[in-house]
């Protein structure tokens, strides 16, 4: 008499995939050391520095990103030298090779490939041999960075002048429909200095969407300011007369990371969360689920909800349980309020499982 279980068919089950996006704005006041640099963490290994949204010793601090710098074995900066003259020289090469190995991959001969300005790894082209890496925390980019919405604004002027002088906007313009898939780390797009008519000449970096890593060429500090400014420091306040090349050769990774971080005016992008769902349509036809198996439903073999024998049976649906073929309860859905069910009504309850 009382229908308790009903088998779901293939027509009752639908699988869906939804992409959710969240806007992530990062202003220069956070990344340049809002809390007297207490939100900037350095390490004894000197390979990178980390930025937090709050003093990093606080339990409420969230990791935002890491910054590091490296150059290729083929860079003009990687000539024969000693660690005494070039602090962190070997570390900078190791950082570049490690990131390139993960993001670009290897040739058939096993050699580590270099970052390519136009993104086409196999066709040669201009290589980015001196780069900064901004590795965003998974908390921010989630499953991936949304294509076509990333913008990085850098100050390229002299430290001697206004700190945020000569801002340069870098974005992955057009990446929503034009991106590359030949990276071991997933999909990536080109970062351009112009959105009007981007081409390989205006490419100054790469953005790896699933990895959440921006690779910015040091060339952004070349030719973007008046000659008088170009002769002064473009990066570190501790090097008032150093060009980028001089600073990269004579400063540690920590100094270079702090310098590029101080030049960040703004970063904005949308992250992406892939939500996979299975929707179960639980249908109660007119002749189903009109009775309850609850012992209190009966009183001396009579239905409590019926005043006379001619009245229709009535039940109130409050819970839906999903069972396996072995009759094992796997999931329970609770209704916000009981739904009245009798032979004159049919109900379809939509149960969604997200994972």
Image: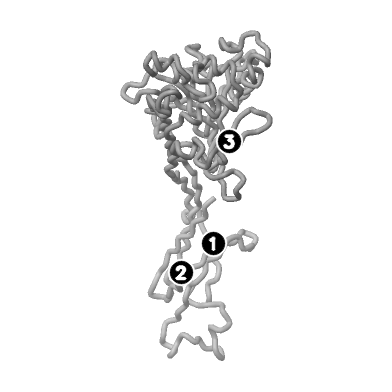
Find the residue positioned furthest to the left.
Answer: 196
Disc on the earlier residue, 1 or 2: 1
Q: Which residue is mark 3?
A: 50
Q: Mark 2 = which residue? A: 336
Q: N-terminal of the two: label 3 or label 2?
A: 3
Number of other residues with Cα within 10 Å of mark 3, as a class: few under 14, some 14 to 19, many 20 or more: many
Kindly give the residue lying farthest to the top in the view shown.
Answer: 80
Of 295 and 8, the residue lying toward us: 295
Image quadrant assignment for residue 203: top left
* Circles 1 and 2: CB atoms closer than 8 Å: no
Instruction: Answer yes or no: is residue 27 visible.
Output: yes
State how far apart marks 3 and 2 are (Cα): 45 Å
Instruction: Indicate whether 73 appears above or below 278.
Output: above
- Who is closer to the viewer here, 295 or 112? 112
- Tell me where residue 144 appears, x and y as whole percent: 50, 37
Helix, strand or loop status at disc 2: strand
Residue 153: x and y, percent?
41, 30
Residue 120 visible, this orientation: no
x 56%, y 77%: residue: 293
Q: Nearer the viewer, mark 1 or mark 2?
A: 2
- Give the x, y percent position of residue 355: 54, 50
Element marked by disc 3: strand
Q: Position of residue 61 (x, y in %)?
A: 57, 46
Q: Residues within 10 Å of mark 2 (few under 14, many from 20)?
A: few
The residue pinned by badge 1 equals 7
């Amino acid at each position: 008499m009382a229908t308790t279980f009903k088998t779901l068919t293939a027509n009752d089950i639908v699988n869906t995939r939804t992409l959710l996006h969240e806007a992530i704005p990062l202003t220069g006041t956070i990344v340049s050391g809002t809390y007297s640099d207490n939100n900037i963490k350095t390490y004894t290994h000197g390979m990178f520095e980390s930025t937090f949204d709050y003093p990093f010793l606080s339990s409420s601090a969230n990791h935002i990103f890491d910054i590091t710098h490296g150059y290729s074995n083929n860079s003009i900066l990687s000539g024969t030298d000693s660690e005494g003259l070039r602090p962190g020289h070997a570390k900078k090469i190791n950082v570049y090779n490690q990131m390139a190995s993960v993001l670009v991959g290897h040739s058939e001969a096993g050699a580590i490939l270099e970052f390519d300005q136009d993104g086409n790894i196999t066709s040669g082209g201009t290589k980015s041999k001196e780069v900064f890496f901004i590795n965003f925390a998974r908390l921010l980019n989630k499953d991936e960075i949304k294509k076509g919405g990333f913008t990085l604004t850098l100050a390229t002027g002299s430290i001697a002048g206004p700190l945020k002088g000569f801002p340069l906007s870098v974005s992955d313009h057009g990446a929503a429909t034009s991106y590359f898939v030949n990276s071991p780390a997933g999909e990536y797009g080109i970062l351009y200095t112009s959105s009007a008519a981007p081409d390989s000449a205006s490419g100054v970096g790469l953005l790896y969407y699933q990895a959440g890593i921006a690779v910015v060429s040091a060339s952004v500090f070349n030719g973007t300011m008046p000659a008088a400014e170009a002769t002064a420091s473009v990066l570190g306040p501790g090097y008032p007369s150093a060009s980028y090349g001089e600073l990269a050769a004579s400063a540690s990774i920590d100094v270079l990371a702090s310098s590029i971080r101080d030049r960040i005016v703004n970063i904005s992008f949308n992250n992406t969360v892939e939500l996979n769902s299975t929707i179960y349509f639980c249908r109660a036809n007119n002749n189903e689920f009109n009775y309850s198996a609850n012992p209190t439903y009966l009183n001396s073999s009579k239905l409590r909800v019926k005043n006379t024998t001619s009245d229709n049976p009535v039940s109130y649906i409050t819970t839906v349980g999903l069972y396996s073929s072995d009759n094992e309860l796997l999931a329970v859905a609770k209704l916000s309020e009981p739904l009245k069910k009798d032979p004159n009504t049919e109900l379809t309850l939509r149960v969604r499982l997200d994972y």
